[in-house]
Structure formats: C-alpha cells, structure tokens
Amino acid sequence: MAAVERRKILRLGFAGICALMGSPALASTSTMGSRLLSFENLHTGEHASVTYWKDGAYIPDALKVLDHLLRDHRTNEVMEIDRQLFDQLHQLQALMESTKPFQIISGFRSPRTNAMLARRSGSVSKRSYHQFGMAVDVRLPGTRLRDLRMAALSMNVGGVGYYPRSNFIHLDTGRVRFW
C-alpha cells in the first residue's frame, strides 16, 4: 500500500473517531490561519480560487465571489450560500489532500429551476436544500468518487448523496444523513 493511501486511510479513520466523539470532524478551533477554496463551474466555465476565511473571520468580498460562482446558471439568480457549506468543502478537500478545484455540477437553484428539474427527474427533491443555498453537487478531479463520498461521510456533518452514474456527490448543511 502506498504511503499516500495509508495517510488517507489514517486521516479518514481520525475523522471517524472525531465524529463518534460528537465533535465536528477536523474542525479547527484556531482563529489563526486561512481557508481557501477553488471551484470550476462546469456550466458557465468560470473559475475562482478564493481565500474566504482568515484569522477567525469570513471575508465578505470573497464570499460574494463564491456566491456568484455558485449561482443558478439557468436564471442567473444569486443567493448567499451557507458559510458552513464552504467549511465542509474545505474540510473535505483537506481530507482528500487535494489542491485541485471542485467541479460544480449544481449550487444554488431558484425555486423555479428546482421545480423544473424535479418534474424531469425523480431524484430531485421538491424541497431541495439547493433552493436555500445549503447544498452543492461536486466532483474533485483526480479523486475517485467513492473515496470522495467516504471522506464526506466520515466528517459526519450534513447530508451526503452519492450519484455514481452522474459522477458527483451531493453535500448539504442539513441534518446528518446519506443516500
């Protein structure tokens, strides 16, 4: 087994222990440092790499960039994305030891867009967290989808959906659950 694979397994095991102890997995209690996220929106072709949190505070201008990038690409509507979702993505990227940008399949969806998608597919919830800026569908280049799912599950925060046929996972800031 390669050293990189052993480290990932150990890190996932540590995250699982943190989850069992009732604390957010790998949550940083430090007020120092920074958190960076990189995204590629597959529908608009837009890219962004943004430090969204620094020394204990979210950075408003950086958050606006991320909110815009995760907008409903069909209607161009922007909604404030739940800041905890960015923290989940940051933790997930750290678990995967990746610096590659998340590929965005879906971020915010307007109620109109969500209703249209729900009519087309039984897998789209009529009460989707996407409508409230609390969910994102992503993949991470260079990472096996099932490994990304397992890492997300190990964090024991929010919802984790697995869509291997469509090649993405769903993350949200709702209650802990999976499908």
Image (tube, rainbow, N blue to C red):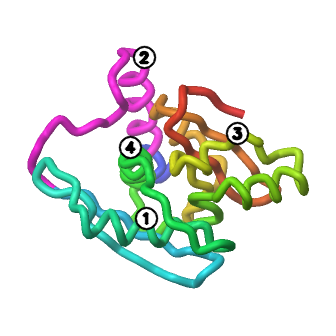
Residue at 54% in and 33% down: 174
Residue 127's tag is 3
* Distance of label 4 from label 1 (alpha carbons): 13 Å
Instruction: Kindly identify the amino acid type of the residue bearing the numbered disc 3.
Output: Arg
Q: CA distance from mark 4 to mark 3?
A: 19 Å
Q: Nearer the viewer, mark 4 or mark 3?
A: 3
Q: Is residue 69 magenta?
A: no
Distance (Cα) linking label 2 and label 3: 29 Å
Which type of secondary structure does the marked residue at label 2 adopt? helix
N-term mark: 2 or 3? 2
Q: Which mark is residue 84?
A: 4
Q: Earlier in the sequence, mark 3 or mark 1?
A: 1
Magenta segment boundaries in residue numbering: 8-33
Between 117 and 102, the one nearer to me in the picture: 117
Which of label 4 and label 2 is nearer to you? Answer: 4
Task: Choose mark 2 or mark 3, whichever is in front.
Answer: 3
Could you tell me the amino acid type at mark 2?
A: Leu
Q: Which residue is mark 2?
A: 20
